[in-house]
Amino acid sequence: MESFFYIILGLVAIFCAYRAMLAQRLLSSILYLACVSATVSVILYLLGAQQVAVIELSVGAGLVTVLMVYALSVVGDDAQDLLSVIPKPLAFCIVALLAVLAGFMVYNPNPMSDSTLQTTSFSLATVLWQVRVLDVWIQIALIFSGVLGVLGLLSEKAAPTSKKGEVHS
Amino acid sequence: MAAILSILLIALPWLGAILVWLTGDSRPKILHILAVTFSLGAGLVSLVLLAFAGPGSVLSVQVGSLFGAFTLNPDGLGASLAAVACVVGSLAVIFSVDYMHGEAQLSRYYTFVLLFIGAMTGLVLSGNLLFTFFFWEITALCSYALISFYNDDPKAVAGGIKALIITQVGGVGLLAGTLAAYASLGSLQVADLLKGAATMPAGILAVVAFGFLLAAAAKSAQFPFHTWLPDAMEAPTPVSALIHAATMVNAGVYLLARFYPAFVNVPGWTLAVTLVGMISALIAGLMALTATDLKRALAYSTVSQLGYMVYAIGVGGVFASQFHLLSHAVFKALLFLSAGAVIHSVGTRDMRRMGGLGAKMPFIRNVFIVGALALAGLPIFNGFWSKELILEAGLKGPWWAFGFMLFGAGLTAFYTIRMTWLVFFGAEREQLHAHASGTAMKIATGALALGTLTTWLLAGPLSNLLANSLPFHKLEPLATWLMVEEVLSAPATWIALVVIAAGAGLWAAIQFRKTGTVLSAQPTATAGWFDVVATSSFGFEWLNQQVVSVVKKTSTELQKTQTGELNWNILGIVGALLAVLAILAWGV
Amino acid sequence: MNISALNIVLIIIIGLLGVGLYGLLITRNLIKIVLVLQILVKSAMLALVLAGKAAGNLDLGQSLAVTVIVADTVVAVVGLALAVQVRRRFGTLDVPQISTLRG
């Protein structure tokens, strides 16, 4: 029964990802990405990782979507040239080969069982703040540097063609 | 103590290189002072290290499980070569103070010279095969950079690229040998290779042996790789003295001497080494007969003398080859530096335009004669003792090789006297402006001349040092007085002296026949076909041109894959991922 | 066939990976590249949680997944800021037209 849910959700996720990639307008792509986020979040919840599911939902379907829409509004939604640099059949073949190889490598005839050893491990809070505390500090540093970087990038005025613009970074 | 000295020996020149680079071109005086200080410091440290040299490694730093340990082995072989490199290096740097006075981009010059000195000492002191390879490549880089130092001269750039490509071919041999040894023995340490050579399968040992021979032949400009050294003479003369006479080209001989006990039993190896040395000595000597460029003649002579050293290793005289290496470094550096003084003052390298310069540059003439007599192998000078030791060792090898080497000694005398005569004696062929040389030049060449007269006395200590610190080579110590006795009483010595006298006499006779007097100034002409053959390096020049042009064409074609487009690059990444997955899936 | 739930998730991961890589190869628009990178990272996150579940240590997998989310969000933010700057300077977001680094 559980497998059925996974199959449905998986199909939805891959379909949305595919549409996101091929959509004509960027706005549609962003909406499809939000769908992918939501689907992946549900899959995560079904796997048992509730906290990460919530984080993924709010960040992926919320924050990233808003950010991209904002960037899109600044940049403008131009019509795109659909002719790709690399011929589509070639790309498809390579990726298909890759997927088949990867699948071949990880396919395990013995089905993976859900381990019931969960109870002996720490709670998420302990893991985050004690076992992997270095990860958390690195993440905080990352966030700060990202914010600084964005502030620096966005504070540059318009291109040199504009008389009022001055570039400082 | 030895550990600190060894590290200092690599670190001092490199620190000097960094400081010189940071100082920049705007303050040449500081550059000169810095370079001289650091190279002199390295020279002193290397002499002190000689007292502490001993078998085994003094420093072992673990650098990860793949590379093993970075070890430094300042044993007799390494310490003596490091001393040669640093002392001759410091003298060459002192000489450069005058020679490169007023040149542009001095910081680039001194940086690379100091970098080179540090890398050379690292090469001879290293006890880990892979680090030897790293230092080997750094010396090749410095050699390329210094040959093409005058980078608006297309000849210099072409010479640099040629030297780089040919020595890199040798580098491939060294790397292949290293990896084969690692695959078979599981360790990259030199000591392990020497110990475990007998246990390696014969095929792999042969790969290692001939790979190292390839590397040594390419680096020391031996047959069939002898064409890069004459073209490398576009470098400034102190660089020629340092790199292409006294240190870098000795790296090949060092490699062969270091691994001799491991490879001596590989079938055909000693014969190959003997042949390579003999052929190089002969054809280089023949090419020096017709050379008209002073530095080119000296370059051919270097190849020839290195051929003697390689031949000595081939017939089993490891001590003889190292002793000749010491003598050769001193007298060849002396010859190059004095030639540099001459070239610097008259402005040309063509010997046909020089003549009678002895009267105007007496000091340089005298030191040059000292070097030339050592090169020809006349008694008292250090070249005599070491060359005779080699010939004596040659009696144990094939008799036909001995005969050719004897003939080579006569050739050496012939072209040496020709060279000296053309430059310093006879009547002036052109009105060339020649001024006396500066103080720094005199100091450097004078010190080397003194060395030429006295380094043969170090035979005893050197032999002791080598015997005590090289457990695998099974050398016997030989006191200086015993060596003198041995040389003077061996029949090979007297035969060789007769041959040398014959060579000198032949030159005088040809002069007399052509011009009616021995003291004429005309250069001797040889048969036309011989000139053509000699100047094209017996056909190898064409071969090397082909190799260089193939490499250049391939690189131009490969540049087309760098399109700069994002999707193309991602395709490359995905393709590589596919290859990796395929290899993993089907197992290797 | 006896495919367990976890194997299905593996197939989903490979599927998302494939779609993401195909998108990277095809796309010509800078913002779309950032978007496709997001898809790729979601598959990585799923893989981490899956590995954690299969090994029994789900919380470790979750913490790693949180790290990945944070990192990739920062990447998306900076990437978008870069895209805005590129638009201002070059006037276009077309990747082949802004490639000036040639071999």
Image (tube, coloured by chain):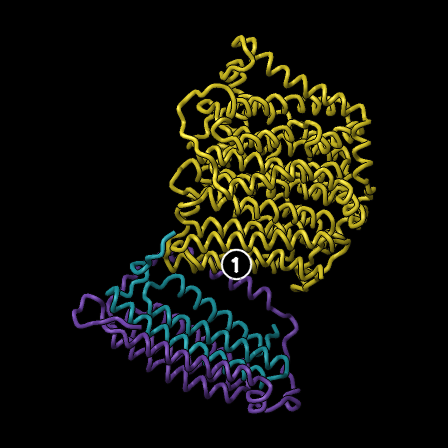
Above or below: residue B172 compared with residue C62: above
Question: Residue A71: x percent and y percent?
Answer: 29, 76
Specify the quadrant that holds the N terminus of chain C. Answer: bottom right
Image-based side of B134 in relation to B572, left or right? right
What secondary structure is marked by label 1? helix
Nearer to the camera, B474 or A73: B474
> In the rendered picture, chain B carries what hue?
yellow
> Residue B106: x percent and y percent?
43, 49
Q: In the picture provided, is A119 more to the left or to the right than B201? A: left
| Residue sitting at x 68%, y 27% | B378
Question: Residue C89 in the image: x percent, y percent?
Answer: 25, 66
Q: Is residue B329 left or right of residue A96?
A: right
- Which of the two residues, B64 or C27, is positioned nearer the viewer here? B64
Chain letter, purple: A
* Chain that bears disc 1: B
Q: Can residue B101 be seen in this view?
A: yes
Tell me which amino acid carries mark 1: Leu
Q: In this view, does B4 lie above or below B303?
A: below
Query: Which one of the lettered chains is coloured cyan?
Result: C
Toward the viewer: B36 or B559?
B36
Residue identified by numbered label 1? B578
